[in-house]
Image: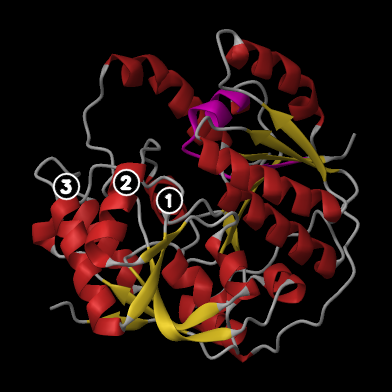
Amino acid sequence: MTGRLAFVESPVQLLNVLEWAHATALRGAPARLGAVPSQPDRRHDAAAAAPVPPAAPPLAHAGLTVVVLSPTDPMSRGQLRRMAQLARDEGITVRWQDARQGRGALAKTLRELSGPLRAAERVIVGDPFSRYVQLLLTLFGPRRVTVVDDGTATMEFAAQLARGERLVRWHRRGGGGPRELVLAPVTSLARRKLAPGRHRTVEIFTSLPVEPPPGTTVTANDFAWTRSRFGPPRLTRGADLVGTSLVETGVVDPDEYLRAVTVLACTHGATRYFAHRRESAEKLHRIAVETGLEVVRPDLPLELIARRGPIGRTIVSFPSTVVHTLPLALVGTGVKVAVCEIAPEWLRDNASPRAQGFLAGVAGTATLTERLEFG
């Protein structure tokens, strides 16, 4: 069998698998890797200058199977089911795996996927930090690996791979409890199986400014599939705000976050707040009551929502993946994307020491966005 097997756990990961499949099909060689961009800015400039691809019929993706390692929260599951249907419409096989449902689900998942994983010619990974993916990779080391974007985590993955460090999400503090100690051998083995070597090629398919670790290939994701399938959108007169889960991940103080949202809404005349799928209902209720913003829970990744429209002429976001992806998805539409950096005083006392620098890097490297002065 010479199939390709993708593991995804979020709607954005599945979107980026679709983008990878589209770009690979257009190149005409499923096993061929793209070229390394010499400079991140040149890649973005090329995407901005490129015409919007014409609408095209669904491409056949024979041999590509997407395994959805379904999360438990309802918002993510709902978005994933809708993304799964879009993938099926493109001729992609989708396998829904309830890997977290009840006792014995993990063992059952590992048992059921071990055969397809061993037979796969290429493995596409949506989240290299996922414990589920890491456990699966301990079963078999694929000869060809592609890592697609899972938000800004791709930047940290590339940096840790280049430095030979263990894979740790940027917003987690150092140290390691009993669970981390138990899983340390799995993480270490998974890192080796995600690294290039004599018998393994590694591609990073990304819309983010990533320096290729030694031996890897970085291929630019310019959201050609999204632009060919949706839009251009109808623009509204006002602005839209994009929410973030930085409060939920323990990075930003909730009161400071609410104050920032209030100021941004007033300054830019925003009327809608597009919630991140991980934002809590309590926080969103408070935002709606105290700011008057209409809180929207998107049923698809924001890149698709924005491309379908209607969308504001200005989109304001805190540092997140969308400050890199939305300008690419909306190229040529006249929409302006602006980023508001996270002030040091907004961070919680127990936030990771890396948080401020990482978030500043996310905002600072977004070359197609406008930088906002907060006040």
Foreground pick, 160 / 78 = 78
Instruction: Give coordinates of residue 167: x percent, y percent.
Output: 40, 37
Residue depicted at 59% across the width and 16% down the height: 106
Three-letter code, disc 2: Trp
Tag 1's secondary structure?
helix
For disc 2, the marked residue is 170
Callout 3 crowding tier (Cα within 10 Å): few <14, some 14–19, many ≥20: some
Three-letter code, disc 3: Pro
Instruction: Give coordinates of residue 237: x percent, y percent.
Output: 46, 88
**Quarter assignment of residue 90:** bottom right
Three-letter code, disc 1: Ala
Q: Counting residues from the N terminus, which is met first, the one under dot 3 or under dot 1?
A: 1
Residue depicted at 31% across the width and 66% down the height: 318
Q: Alpha carbon of mark 1 to alpha carbon of mark 2: how far?
A: 7 Å
For disc 1, the marked residue is 153
The quarter in which the C terminus is drawn is bottom left
> Can the viewer see residue 147 in this picture?
no
> Can the viewer see residue 87 in this picture?
yes
For disc 3, the marked residue is 353
Q: Is residue 346 above or below residue 23?
A: above
Looking at the image, do the residues carrying marks 1 and 2 touch, with CB atoms under 8 Å apart?
Answer: yes
Residue 342 in magenta stretch? no
Left or right position of 13 against 295: right
Q: Is residue 2 above or below residue 357?
A: above
Residue depicted at 61% across the width and 91% down the height: 49
Left or right position of 122 against 291: right
Q: Which residues are magenta?
A: 122-136
